């Protein structure tokens, strides 16, 4: 199975990226100088912490090996509580995205798709 990392993005911004063929990042990514990603074990907390009231989102699964195959490297850097989070310094090509699915907001938080598919 491919190792996946995940990006949460506003739907409109993601649709623009799909049309362009790459994702340069959300405003916070651009401000920080890299695209923030989460692992499967981190993404639910990321959604709750940074997107708690936003239901117009996309969850994108990115194949780590594809990034490596096209010469892009992830930096695993400490963030919340010292946990290492994957960061990409540069644009994300859509070729590395395995899938992008809606991330709706339910009564008890975001409703996540199966992260393994």
Image: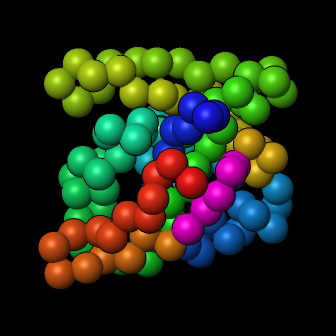
Residue depicted at 63% across the width and 34% down the height: 2
In depth, the one of 76 and 5 nearer the eye is 5
Decide whether residue 24 is among the magenta residues: no
What percent of the width, then of the height, locates residue 34? 55, 33
- Specify whether residue 31 is in view: no
Q: Which residues are magenta?
A: 97-101
Extreme residue in the bottom direction: 107
Asked where in the image residue 52 lies, by quadrant, the reply is: bottom left
Residue 104 vs 60, above or below: the answer is: below
Asked where in the image residue 56 lies, by quadrant, the reply is: bottom left
| Prevailing secondary structure of the magenta residues | strand
What percent of the width, then of the height, locates residue 108? 16, 73
The quadrant in which the C terminus is found is bottom right
Residue depicted at 67% across the width and 20% down the height: 73
What is the count of numbered marks?
A: 0
Residue depicted at 17% across the width and 24% down the height: 81
Decide whether residue 98 is among the magenta residues: yes
- Specify whether residue 53 is in view: yes
What percent of the width, then of the height, locates residue 105? 30, 77
Residue 109 vs 116, above or below: the answer is: below
Residue depicted at 59% across the width and 22% down the height: 74
């Amino acid at each position: 199975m491919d190792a996946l990392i995940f990006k949460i993005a506003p739907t409109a911004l993601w649709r623009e990226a799909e049309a362009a063929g790459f994702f340069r990042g959300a405003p916070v990514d651009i401000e920080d100088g890299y695209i923030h990603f989460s692992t499967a074990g981190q993404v639910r907390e990321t959604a709750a912490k940074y997107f708690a009231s936003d239901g117009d989102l996309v969850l994108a699964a990115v194949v780590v090996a594809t990034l490596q195959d096209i010469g892009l490297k992830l930096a695993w850097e400490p963030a919340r509580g010292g946990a290492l989070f994957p960061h990409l310094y540069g644009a994300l090509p859509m070729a590395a995205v395995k899938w992008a699915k809606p991330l709706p907001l339910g009564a008890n938080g975001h409703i996540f798709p199966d992260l393994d598919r």
